[in-house]
Image (cartoon, rainbow, N blue to C red):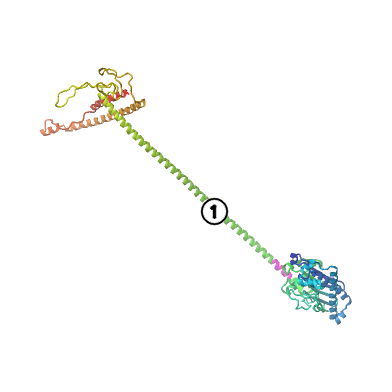
Amino acid sequence: MKMGTFHISVQGASHLRKNKECQDASDSYRDERCAIAVVCDGHGGNDYIRSALGAKFACQSAMQDLKSFLEHTDAEQMRTKGEVLIRTLEASIISHWHSQVEAYTRCSPFTAEELEQVSEKARQKYQSGRVESAYGTTLIAAAVTADYWFGIQIGDGKCVAVNPEGKFRQPIPRNEKCFLNATTSICDENALENFRHFYSRRLPVALFVGSDGVDDCFKSDEQLQSLYRTVLYSFTQSAFDAAVTEFSDYLPRLSAKGSGDDVSVAAILDLDKIGEIESVKAFDKAKERAKVEEHARQEEARLEEERKRVQARFDEQERARQARQEAALRAREAAERDAALKAAEIARQEAARANQEAERAHREAERARQEAARARQEAERVIQEADRKAREEAAFSSWQGIAPQPWQADGLEDASLEPVEFCPECGSMLYPGESCCTYCGAWLAAAPSERTLDTEPIRPGISSDVIAEAQAELTGLVTQMQQEEESAAAEAAVEEAARQVLSEERKLPDEGRGSEEEKTERSAAPELPKPAAGLAEELAKVTEPITLSLDLF
């Protein structure tokens, strides 16, 4: 038969995270006579500070003793004394392991740093010379020849054999002491009693030995068997070294997804028969079916991913559209709010300007009212002053040129009075003996009969501005009196016309007719006012002295 062997030990994921060394060891061997596979798992407790070396020593001792055993033991001896021979092999492996441990300890005693890592009990034990526990490890080994095969084990881990019918079996008996993290060890005092083994002349098609780091990655033996079935299938589809490399690359991922512990697998394969195993053939069909299903699943996943991508793109576009709408709405609201604020500000400014204009107009109106009141008061004052002066001037003018007349009183005889003279400057009456006018202050130099106005009369207290203002007021008064004269003339003309009309109406056809009473009524009718000409003559008499009086200033 064409045998093939391989062995793989990989540092666990948890050990990588903790920067802890791999505590597993494995080895394999084959020649034209036999094939051997060995896996050792050093204990992971803090007291087992040299368990990696212990696993290495156990692997070397087992490989050395198995080679020697297979070289000196034939099929007949195994058939007749197989149980004794295997037990002797196990004792030899334990002995050689202890020899290696003692030799290494003598060469490399425990350091202070190593002893600080262990418990007090273990430290006292190691310092007393009982150092085996520091190198504690498990061991699984299997050997196959052309006539028989057998397997030995102490501690946890599993040996899985595939018989010619393609059935997966675990031929080495279980040890109830190996449960969870508890296990037997080659460092135990009763290690030989804890060894288990299996012997058969029916050769397996494939044989796998693995550490508990592999077992703990699966929930059941069926899942572990599925792993080994996949490995066998890979060896039927790929070259031997390529299949080993592929399996070696897979084990770290298995540890990371599973136990996190170090993982080790060693195998012996009959390369001529593994392709004929029904389970492998079925696995090939299942593999093809799985490929088709995987392809369909991938295609479905791709379509689902595409659908999700399209949906996500649509959702993104919808969100973008809604965002644009919301942004536009917010912008419109902001613009309307800004426009309203601007309009309110403009209205406020306009109202402020209107208030200012109203206040200014009110102030202007108040000033105009005050100015009008002042103008009215000033006009009234000017009119009153002008009227007063006009009356005085009229009175003064009426006295000029009037010869003194003797006073006559009703019921009395005529009496002669002293002659009366008047001031040639202002026309005021002068009393006999006065040398100065009591009104205008003009000095009279001559005798009363010869009194004339000085060429340069003295006018105390009268300035040129007062004279000019008086002249302006008198001029306005004259203009007003002329306008009143014209108005009175017009009214007189109207009254004359009305009088004539009434006279015509009162005339009868026969003036001689009528009773005496009617004639008496006609003669007793009131006379109408005189024509306007008489009024004009009277006004001329009054205004003439006013005009003359303007020259006095």
Count of number-bearing discs:
1
- The image quadrant of residue 144 is bottom right
Magenta stretch: includes residue 295: yes
Tell me if mark 1 has few (under 14), some (14-19) or many (20+) residues whose alpha carbon lies within 10 angstroms of its own.
Answer: few
Above/below status of 161 relative to 384: below
Q: Is residue 243 visible?
A: no
User: Which residue is outermost to the bottom?
Assistant: 80
- The image quadrant of residue 92 is bottom right
The C terminus appears in which quarter of the rendering? top left
Above/below status of 403 relative to 494: above
- The image quadrant of residue 404 is top left
The N terminus appears in which quarter of the rendering? bottom right
Left or right of 532? Residue 298 is right
- Estimate the x, y position of residue 300 in percent, counting from the top left: 67, 65
- Estimate the x, y position of residue 433 in percent, counting from the top left: 25, 21
Magenta stretch: includes residue 282: no
- Write down the residue under mark 1: 330
Between residue 164 and residue 436, name the one nearer to us: 436
Q: Is residue 331 visible?
A: yes
- Estimate the x, y position of residue 370 in percent, counting from the top left: 37, 37
Left or right of 446? Residue 239 is right
Between residue 155 and residue 459, name the one nearer to us: 459
Kindly identify the amino acid type of the residue bearing the numbered disc 1: Arg
User: Which residue is outermost to the right?
Assistant: 72
Left or right of 339? Residue 289 is right
Q: Secondary structure at mark 1?
A: helix
Above/below status of 504 relative to 28: above
Give the magenta range: 286-296
- Estimate the x, y position of residue 260 in percent, counting from the top left: 73, 68
Q: Main secondary structure of the magenta part?
A: helix
Between residue 426 and residue 160, name the one nearer to us: 426
